[in-house]
Image: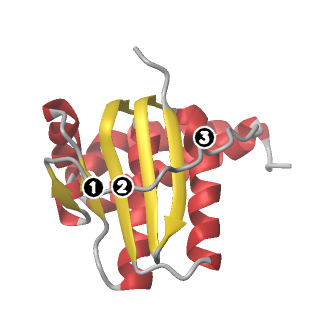
Amino acid sequence: MQSGEVFAGCEDKTFYLRMTGDVRLTWSVSLEDYCRHVFQTQSIEFVLIDLCQVKNLDSTTLGILAKIAIAAKADLGRMPEIYLQDADIERLLMSMGFNAIFVLHNSMPPLVPQLPRLPLLNASASEMQETVIDAHRTLMDMNKQNSDQFESLVSTLKSDRDKSGPAS
């Protein structure tokens, strides 16, 4: 499967995010760090996410997307939009309840500017673990089905974290 990439940028008060290929855990810290920076420092009014070239999204990436939706709704007063064209990706998003926090379009997005590729940040194991736990907690808070699905994973990760001591 094609390795994933994440592209992002802001233009005309719109925050654009494009993912391609198989986007997995390795992108989680970079993606979350960049999105946090955008919401704290940029004057944005709209969030557009292009998933038309995505082949797969892991659950951590889905949790971070959910966090983006929650932040957009809180900060901008509107739901972000996701554009996609793959029926499997659409089923995945629907099964997680993304239709409740995003406006989903089964089409190509309007013209999206050229976006720079996000740098892939090196994260410590403890940073990665906290990101995974937090992303899955966000998914769990969305609905009971997600809560049931990820409860044991989050419990195990928290237990492992607690055994290894405080994050440095």
Q: Are marks 2 and 1 in contact (CB under 8 Å)?
A: yes
Instruction: Report the Cα–Cα distance between label 2 and label 1.
Output: 5 Å
Residue beneath disc 1: 82
Number of residue marks: 3
Q: Residues within 10 Å of mark 1 (few under 14, many from 20)?
A: many
Say how the picture is coloured: secondary structure
What residue is rendered at 45% in x and 53% in y? 17
Residue depicted at 57% across the width and 39% down the height: 27
- Residue 49, label in figure: 2
Find residue 148 and report its image quarter: top left
Secondary element under disc 2, as helix, strand or loop, is: strand
Name the disc covering residue 159, or none.
3
From the viewer's perspective, is the residue at label 1 or at label 3 nearer?
1
Mark positioned earlier in the residue sequence (2 or 1)? 2
Q: Is residue 72 left or right of residue 168?
A: left
Q: Residues within 10 Å of mark 2 (few under 14, many from 20)?
A: many
Q: Please tell me in which quadrant of the rendered image residue 80 appears.
A: bottom left
Q: Amino acid at mark 1?
A: Ile
**Amino acid bearing label 2:** Ile
User: Taking 72 as reference, is 152 above or below it?
Assistant: above
Counting residues from the start of the chain, the first of labels 2 and 3 encountered is 2
Q: Earlier in the sequence, mark 1 or mark 3?
A: 1
Please tell me the numbered disc located at residue 9.
none
Tag 1's secondary structure? strand
Q: Residue at x 41, y 34 (%)?
A: 20
